[in-house]
Image (cartoon, rainbow, N blue to C red):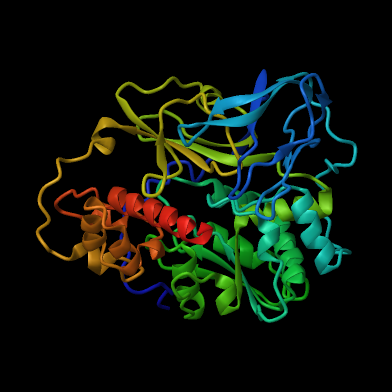
Amino acid sequence: MKLKTFKPGGVHPPANKLSANIPTVKLGLPKEVSIPLSQHQGALAVPVIKKGDVVKVGTLIARGEAFISANIHSSVSGTVVKIDDVLDASGYKTPAVVIKVEGDVWEESIDRSETLVKDITSEPEAIVAKIKEMGIVGLGGATFPTHIKYMVSDDRKVDTLVVNGVECEPYLTSDHRLMLERTEEILQGVRILMKAAKVDRAIIAVEANKPDVVAKMQAKMNPAQYPGMEVVALEVKYPQGAEKQLLQALLKREIPGGKLPLDVGCIVNNVGTVLAVYEALQKNKPLFERVVTITGKKLKKTGNFLARIGTPVSMLLEALGEEMPEHTAKIINGGPMMGKAVNSLDIPITKGISGIVLLDESEARRREPMNCTRCAQCVAICPLGLQPYLLEKLAYRENFEACEAEAVMDCCECGSCSYICPSARPILDYIRHGKANVMRIMKERRQQ
């Protein structure tokens, strides 16, 4: 049977899923954590603790008071040392709560048992409120506060929940391991979110290069217990996991420029987010830890670790028993296509970090850019039907009004254009420059 996929465009970078068969291991506790107050889209969370306070694992330490924001909880037990600026994955300093670790005492309200809880007693509004209380955000990288997706106005009709387990980004395997190791908890999380969204249909999307996941999901998905759910294997093609491409592949629904999945009757959540929802509703557990992949071709070992938020990324490498490989040229937060380089392993793990990839010089080196040959390969592979070569030139010339007119804001920054370009043009770099300035111009318009 022909697998579903999106059109037009897409590329096929080497998968390099080096850690796909390595079980998740709990990472040890650090001596100190730095928990940023911004681990989500929107406004900073506001601290509700101060220096000298003693906290437990799961204690609320900052409240998301703005409409778009998220609560933040302590990932460790110990004493608050300070609230100060720390360097994060963006390369800039951001306010964070620094906690000295003293033991591992959890809030008594958290159910730490491994018993699967099946009964869903909460009503839709209570589910959404709990998701907000527990600080859950999108764990696929976007970190959008999850509760907002379920605040659906009466004039919008939602009929389908889509669970994104595609994980099309090369190297990353944290979602793969979650779906294998926490299958039933994820299915229960899907049930909870179906109730929150008031829908009778849910699709769990997985790329066909994860046949073990597809088989296990289907084996566990008893129709009597999980009505309305199905698992769909998709063609292996990047960026299959992007929301617009995912909905087109699964449902043949096109999201117009500037619109959201809600506008075509869908809500999309990453599989890690779904697991966090299960733990929040059924275990009363806030989002204070996540699975992170640490990988790279020059590492003797790679791995997947369940890590507490605020833990230094360097501990992932230490847990492998490895040192930084010689000739490491780049440390990537995320995958090599959409991830961004960081200059240190001392940054803290946050809700949005799904993987750390170490690239050697041969992989990281950029070729010297040459003149555009008008080959149109970037146009052919753009999954959104844009003209990347033109957007690059407009952004280079700082003609941001023209960038806006040519729909630069529709770009999902998948990097396919830069990947395919035979002239090694830094297309995505300039498109990001154009988008940033269009956003600035749009903000200035709203303030006038």
Residue at the (19%, 50%) spot, across then down: 425
Give the quadrant of the N terminus.
bottom left
Residue beneath the point at 49% across and 46% down? 20
Residue 109 in picture, x, y percent from top left: 89, 41
Tally of marks = 0
State left or right for residue 141 relative to residue 152: left
Depth check: 306 or 87 in front? 87
111 on left or right of 217: right
Picture coordinates of residue 282 (x, y %)?
A: 83, 54
The quarter holding residue 24 reads top right
In terms of depth relative to the viewer, which is nearer, 169 or 301?
169
Q: Residue at x 29, y 24 (%)?
A: 327
Residue 14, visible in the rendered structure: no
Query: Which is nearer the eye, 33 or 96?
Result: 96
Give above or below for 15 relative to 378. above
Residue 286, percent from left and from top: 76, 44
> x%, y% of residue 30?
65, 21
Q: Residue at x 41, y 72 (%)?
A: 5
Q: Indicate whether 250 appears above or below 25.
A: below
Question: Does the image show residue 321?
Answer: yes
